[in-house]
Structures are given as C-alpha cells and as structure tokens.
Amino acid sequence: MENIKELALCLRDANFCTAFTGAGISTFSGIKDFRGKDGLYKQKDAEKLFDLAVFNQDPGIYYRGAKDFIYDMEYKDPGMVHVLLAELERAGMVTTVITQNIDLLHQRAGSSNVIELHGSPLRHHCLKCGDGSTYEDIAPLVRKNEIPRCKKCGGIIKPDITFFGEALPARALKRAFDAGGKSDLILVLGSSLVVQPAALIPLETVKSGGRMVIVNDMATPLDSHAWQRYFDLESFCVELSRELGL
Ligand code: ZN
C-alpha cells in the first residue's frame, strides 16, 4: 500500500507525533464504543450515566450502569491499537497520546505520556468535602451493588471522569492543545471527532502546518482536512506495523 509506505516515512521523520484516540480503539478490548455502530448511546438512557444533573439526583444510575464497563477494568486487556501506540512511543516515533477514553488501556499497554481529556476513574472524590478515594477503594463496593459514600462526611462520591455538564480538565486540555500545535503529524484513531472542544485539537496540528491522518470507520467532520484517510483500524495497524518492521 503506497500510502502506508509514505506514512511510515513521515512517522520516522516526524519531530513530534501525537496520537489522538477515541472509543473506537477500545472496541477490540470488549469495551463499548459511545457513538459507533453498536455504540453505548444507542442503548436506552445510556447518556444519563454521565450526566452531572442526573448524578447529583441519583448517583446509583451511574454506579449501577458503570459497574460492568468501568469497574471491571482489571479484566480488560489493551487492544492492538494500544499496543501499537506503546511500541511507537518506545521506538521514539510517537511523543504523546491524547485520549478521549477513560479505560486506562493506553497506560496498561505501556504508553507513558498519556493526556486523558475526559478524566479517569482511577481517582474519585467526595462532592461535599473533597476527600479523595482510589479506584481500588471504590470498585469492590460498586461490584457489590453498593453506592459509595464518603467515609468522612457521608457525601456522594463522584469519579474524576468528566460528565456532561462539566468542563474538561483545564490542565489536560491545555497540554493537549499545546501538543496538537507542536505536532508535525497527528494520528486520529477511532474518534468520530464530534465532541467539542476535544475535536479541535487535531485541527491545531493542521493549522500549524502539520499533517493529520484519520482512521475511523465512520465519517468525521474533519475528513476534508486529512492528509490520509483510512477506515479500517485493524488493517491499518497490521500494515503499519509490517511497514515499520515492529
Ligand atoms: Zn466527604
């Protein structure tokens, strides 16, 4: 495939390459995509899970709904995209991974420079007194169908995941825009690029003269800005690995 050869050359030459990943890359790991063909949003009331107003009224809706796809993290394995990106980081070809995912699979695969745009369930905090808890504190309770409460004040405990109705974590967002602007190459993998402002990050690369490659099985609003466009993540990974001799 000529395009892949060209991309491999570009990856080797890039001074600063960023990968921007969305839910599409975790479907290989048995995690439900949000907006994909069989996405979580197609299920009834799924968007309520991450709605701040709903959470404040009844945190049980989130904890019951997230039990089987957030609090079972240790039973899920990184997929081929996570593994490839970790290899590319070790080979000095990918500098930063920016992810919209909250499944921690990039870190598990071995990527060390990961910017989590939508926060992480590794940390939780009490909405009343701010006291922090870890995933390890909370997950066993959720699996027992308990709704965690603050040990100090009895307040509601919320994961440090960005819910609808909340702003994205400011520091992560700034780091992500900085990385986007510095990149001479950005690989957009498994993101439908519809959630703002996150989807503007790859545009920073394009605006500063870098190249954008999009790999996603559905159309994205930035397709016309892409230097290269692929639809199938699996064959993309296989062919790129082969071309790079990984
Ligand atoms: Zn508290």
Image (cartoon, grey):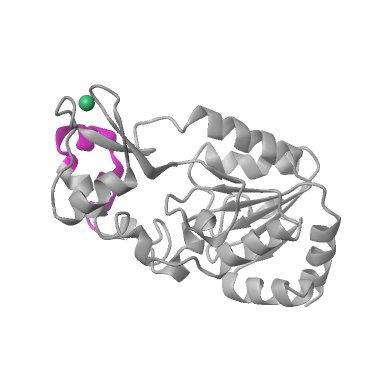
Position of residue 2 measured from the top left corner of the image (x, y, whole percent):
82, 74
- Tell me the quarter of the picture where residue 80 sits: bottom right
Position of residue 5 measured from the top left corner of the image (x, y, whole percent):
82, 71
Instruction: Report if residue 33 is visible in the image.
Output: yes
Using the image as rendered, state which of residue 97 and residue 125 is in the foreground: 125
Q: Is residue 198 left or right of residue 14?
A: left
Instruction: Report if residue 232 is visible in the image.
Output: no
| Quadrant in which the C terminus appears | bottom right
- Tell me the quarter of the picture where residue 220 sits: bottom right
**Count of numbered labels shown in the rendering:** 0
Position of residue 197 measured from the top left corner of the image (x, y, whole percent):
53, 36
Position of 232 relative to 137 (above/below): below
Q: Is residue 80 left or right of residue 179?
A: left
- Tell me the quarter of the picture where residue 223 sits: bottom right
Position of 99 relative to 25 (above/below): above
The range drawn in magenta is: 44-59
For the view shown, which residue lies furthest in the top direction?
129
Using the image as rendered, state which of residue 155 and residue 203 is in the foreground: 155
Position of residue 166 measured from the top left corner of the image (x, y, whole percent):
37, 31
Q: Is residue 191 left or right of residue 187?
A: left
